[in-house]
Image (cartoon, rainbow, N blue to C red):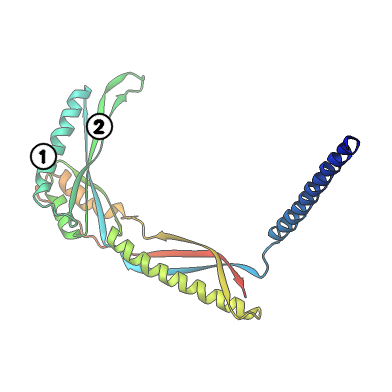
C-alpha cells in the first residue's frame, strides 16, 4: 500500500496543476477576446459643431474718475490723493443706488519721479474712483458734480442678469442647431437617426467695450478750465452679440 501512495499523490498534484493551467488559459483567452473587442473603434461616428447667436443692447456702464498729484515727498502726494478721493466719494454717495449707480475706489498708486540725471526730483501719484450701473444718466450727472477729478474713460457691457438671460437664449438656439445638423447629416448618410456620444458647450461675447475717449474730452476740458458744474457727457451704449458654441460627436444609427 505504501508503494502506491506516492504515485497516487503525484497524480492528484498533476491533475490539479492541469486544471489550474486550463483555467488560466481559458481566462487569458477570454481577456484577450474582451480586450480585442473593447479596442475596436466605434463606427458611424461624426464630429460636428453648431452655434447660437443673440444680439442685445448693452445695459451696464462703467466710468472711471481719476486725479493725479505731484509733490516733493511721497507723504504729501498721498495726503493730497486721499483728500481728493474722500471729497469725491462724499459727493458721489448721495447719488449711489444699488444696481443703478454703484461707487467704489479704484487704483491708488504713488511712484518716484526722476530727472534727466537720474536724480530723484519728487513723487507723483494717481487715484481712481469707479462708477458702474444701469442708469447711464445718473452716472454721467454724478461724475460731472465731482470736483478735482476728471472722467478718464468709460466702457459698456452686460449686467450679470442680462448676460445669464441672453446666454440661455443663445444656448437653446445652439443646441437646437446642433440637433438639426446631426439629424440632417445622419439622414444624408442613409441613417434613420443618431445618438449623442459627447458634447461641450462654450459661451462668449458681450464683453465690455471701451468708449471712445474723445467723448469724455468735453467734460475734462470744462473741469480743467475751472467750471464748477461741467455738463454731463452724452453716452449711448452699443449692441453686443452673445454667442454659444456647441460641439461634439454623434453616432449615426
**243 left or right of 4 in image:** left
The x, y position of residue 224, in whole percent, is: 17, 43
Query: In the rendered view, would you say 42 is above or below 25?
Result: below
Closer-to-camera residue (182/155): 182
**187 left or right of 210 in image:** right
The x, y position of residue 52, in whole percent, is: 44, 69
Q: Residue at x 32, y 61 (%)?
A: 163
Quarter of the image containing the C terminus?
Answer: bottom right
Q: Secondary structure at mark 1?
A: helix
> Dot 2, crowdedness within 10 Å: few (<14), some or many (≥20)?
many
Q: Residue furthest right?
A: 3
In front: mark 1 or mark 2? 1
The x, y position of residue 13, in whole percent, is: 82, 41
> Dot 1, crowdedness within 10 Å: few (<14), some or many (≥20)?
few
Using the numbered discs, state the Cα–Cα distance from disc 1 to disc 2 in whole angstroms.
17 Å
Q: Secondary structure at mark 2?
A: strand
Residue 108's mark?
A: none
- Point out the tag, 1 or 2, that comes first from the N-terminus: 1
**79 left or right of 27 in image:** left
Read off the residue under disc 2.
125
Q: Residue furthest front?
A: 1
Q: Residue at x 51, y 71 (%)?
A: 178
Query: In the rendered view, would you say 150 is above or below 163?
Result: above
Closer-to-camera residue (59/18): 18
Q: Residue at x 84, y 43 (%)?
A: 14
Check contact, mark 1 vs mark 2: CB within 8 A. no
Read off the residue under disc 1.
87
Query: In the rendered view, would you say 175 is above or below 116?
Result: below
Closer-to-camera residue (44/128): 44
- Give the image quarter of residue 113: top left
The x, y position of residue 126, in whole percent, is: 24, 35
Query: In the rendered view, would you say 200 is above or below 10?
Result: below
Amino acid at each position: 500500500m505504501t508503494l502506491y501512495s506516492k504515485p497516487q499523490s503525484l497524480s492528484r498534484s498533476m491533475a490539479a496543476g492541469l486544471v489550474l493551467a486550463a483555467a488560466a488559459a481559458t481566462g487569458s483567452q477570454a481577456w484577450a477576446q474582451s480586450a480585442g473587442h473593447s479596442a475596436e473603434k466605434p463606427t458611424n461616428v461624426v464630429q460636428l459643431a453648431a452655434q447660437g447667436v443673440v444680439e442685445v443692447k448693452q445695459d451696464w456702464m462703467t466710468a472711471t474718475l481719476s486725479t493725479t498729484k505731484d509733490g516733493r515727498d511721497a507723504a504729501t502726494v498721498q495726503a493730497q490723493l486721499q483728500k481728493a478721493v474722500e471729497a469725491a466719494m462724499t459727493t458721489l454717495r448721495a447719488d449711489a443706488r444699488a444696481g443703478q449707480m454703484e461707487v467704489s475706489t479704484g487704483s491708488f498708486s504713488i511712484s518716484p519721479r526722476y530727472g534727466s540725471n537720474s536724480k530723484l526730483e519728487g513723487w507723483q501719484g494717481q487715484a481712481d474712483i469707479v462708477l458702474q450701473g444701469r442708469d447711464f444718466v445718473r452716472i454721467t450727472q454724478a461724475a460731472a458734480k465731482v470736483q478735482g477729478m476728471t472722467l478718464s474713460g468709460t466702457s459698456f457691457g452686460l449686467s450679470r442678469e442680462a448676460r445669464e438671460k441672453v446666454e440661455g437664449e443663445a444656448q437653446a438656439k445652439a443646441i437646437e442647431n446642433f440637433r438639426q445638423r446631426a439629424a440632417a447629416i445622419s439622414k444624408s448618410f442613409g441613417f434613420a437617426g443618431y445618438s449623442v456620444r459627447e458634447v461641450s458647450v462654450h459661451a462668449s461675447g458681450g464683453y465690455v467695450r471701451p468708449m471712445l475717449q474723445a467723448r469724455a474730452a468735453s467734460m475734462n476740458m470744462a473741469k480743467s478750465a475751472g467750471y464748477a458744474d461741467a455738463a454731463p457727457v452724452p453716452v449711448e451704449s452699443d449692441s453686443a452679440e452673445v454667442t454659444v458654441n456647441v460641439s461634439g460627436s454623434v453616432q449615426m444609427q
